[in-house]
Image: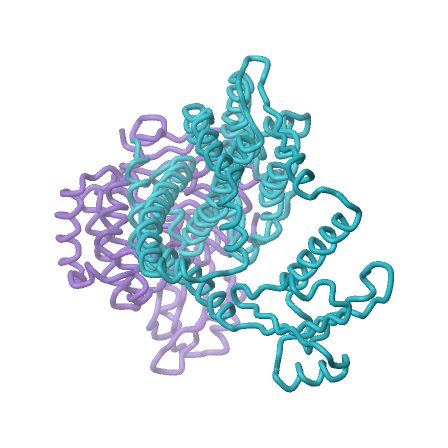
Amino acid sequence: MNHLPLIIKREYLTKVKNKSFIMMTFLSPLIFIALIAFVAYLSQLNNDKIRVVSILDESGLVKDVFKNSGNTSYNILEGMSVEDAKMLVLETKGYGLLHIDDITEGKLTSKDLTFYSEESPSLTLISNLESEIQSELTLQNRIREGIDVEKLKASRVNIEINQESFEGEKTSKVDSIVKLIFGGAAGYLLFMFIIIYGNMIMRSVIEEKTSRIIEVIISSVKPMQLMLGKIIGTSLAGITQFVIWIILGSVLMTVASLILGIDMAQMETPQQQVLEQAMENPEVNLQLQNMVAAFYNLPLTNLIIAFILFFIGGYLLYSSLYAAIGAAVDNETDTQQFMLPIIMPLVLAVYIGIFTVIEDPHGTVSTVFSFIPLTSPVVMLMRIPFGVPIWQQVLSLLILVASFMFTVWFAAKIYRVGILMYGKKPSYKELIKWIKY
Amino acid sequence: MNNLLEVNNVSKYFGDFKALNDVSITIPRGSIFGLLGPNGAGKTTLIRVVNQITMPDSGSVILDGEALSQKHVKDIGYLPEERGLYKSMKVGEQAIYLAQLKGLSKAEAKTRLKYWFERLEIGDWWDKKIQELSKGMAQKIQFVVTVLHEPKLLIFDEPFSGFDPINANLIKDEILRLRENGATVIFSTHRMESVEELCDDIALIHKSNKILEGKLVDIKRQYKINTYEVGIRPYNRALLEKELSEKFNVSKANFRTLEDELKLNIKLQQGEKPNDLLSYLTDKGEVSHFVELIPSVNDIFIQAVNNN
């Protein structure tokens, strides 16, 4: 008798009908969006305040370069001592005072510049001031040395190296970034999925144990069937939740940006200024076009197929381990000692993905870890956008499937024995013994 | 085929621990079979082997003339000692699910459940969650779920635990009725009075070995000690006591009487007849009490376990 569909259906329905599951499904996107809106609101609040920065330039070299912008306005002080200036700023509750020493001869150096303030000043403000003064002084130096500034500007050359593989496939730096984003997103999604729904499977196994229904169930179905039914049912519930999140998230995002959109446009954060300046720059505009092109350059079909296969394979591999852990213990607090060996390779995979795949997607480290079953789903998903030979993908997938079958067998062994064991916290040694039962 | 279930030379090891050692039992069709034994003797392992939860290392199990296989799941109803239900599932839904796992169709399961729920007067629990019910209530549902698919073989492990006397009686009557309708029952319990009351056959498992098996009456005959409990108002008490202790193996007995009487257990030797003892006694006084001591299951249990 094949009860698998029946078990899957029950697992799915109980998960989906569960109150906290429904709450999670519908509240999480709301909370997430609300959080973003809140942060946006806060930073806007912060930027509404105008900072008055006083400048006492005794050298007279740079006092004209400061232009009021955004939320910073400059107050140029003249003809007073530093102490008086400090008092004045303190009394008027100004943001701070930049003092530039008088220099009789030679050049203005760092030791001549001091910023006085009550609290330590914002980093962006200081670096803004520094870059303004730097470029002004550089300009003055060049003029003094008789360098033709216009010619210097005109002589500047910008270079970007074209990349092309031996097969004639063109890529670029932007391409790499887009690939990295795609690979990273796929790998990270799998990572999240495993952690969230693997835990859910584990809890559901523990629940059957603690409610003691397990013996009744396995007098009707094989433990293996029960375990597979659990894994598949929970995954389907997980996919349902994910799809709802994506739909709800994008709808809410649209709504939120429609409501907040006008506000956001008005809001002038320093970051936005930089961005706007960059947008005016024709080079960056070109880069944006490159990005779109890079997206279409991605091996999309390969990416999607590989994503589905590695996602399923990796997820099943890990979830059978989670099921085995659930079977081995009596309650959730006892799971800790067994969680580490699961979480470790997973985290390792993500770090390898981030650090080595960026550096060298086809290097030894990335390649080796994209074959080791516990890390391969994540690492391979991150590598594929950079173009991985099909034979490597197939081989990695075969290894994954083989080890998945082994883990299911192994997990089923532990599961079969573990679900009937009560009252003791098993050690690894004992788990090995169970396999022989 | 007179036997519904035959367990042949089953052994099971857990690592180095031997849970069952070459155990064979035969369960006659239509009987109520008491599976007895101290805690940890191996009863549950044996029951799990019959339920195909645990696979034996050696030996075989024959159900209704066929080697036990996955298709027999629907022929067995099992109420484990460690039992429970999904706490957050509704009673009706859950019962239907469990019945479907035993091979009933959804519609069939529903019809039968309605019948049983009405019978046990629990119809209005249908939409309640298990966590809202008391332990006894959940036990009732568990019982219904166990018998719903009308299996040939019913296995009850401590079926009365958690029930009040009224409900325990109700369940006992249901078990007897199921047997009348053709089911065979394996009954595992530590409550010897219910074994006494219900079982036709028993087997005793001790330290992974079967040490006793057979019809309850046969076993009692086998454990008979030829001892009679006697109450007498002797004409000459001192003389009778002296004579009896010379002629027979005598010990003090303890039972309730209205008058102050001489109460004794008298053990007869091989060949001595109870009638002779009785006629001897009637000469010596007024006999008010003369009963053959039949060993209780409890006595047999303790004796058999201690002897091994």
A346 and B76: which is toward the camera: A346
For residue A267, which quarter of the picture?
bottom left
Residue A235, placed above or below residue A34: above
Residue A13 is at least partly visible in this image: yes
B281 and A23: which is toward the camera: A23
A30 and B152: which is toward the camera: A30
For residue A263, which quarter of the picture?
bottom left
Which chain did the renderer colour cyan?
A
Q: Colour of chain B?
A: purple
Q: Position of residue A11 (x, y in %)?
A: 33, 46
Quarter of the image where the N terminus of chain A is located: top left
Residue A293, placed above or below residue B106: above
Q: Position of residue B59 (x, y in %)?
A: 47, 29
Quarter of the image where the C terminus of chain A is located: top right
Residue drawn at (53%, 43%) of the image = B208
Q: Position of residue A345 (x, y in %)?
A: 61, 40
Residue drawn at (18%, 42%) of the image = B106
Residue drawn at (47%, 27%) of the image = A298
A100 and A35: which is toward the camera: A100
Q: Position of residue A66 (x, y in %)?
A: 63, 64
Residue B201 is at least partly visible in this image: no
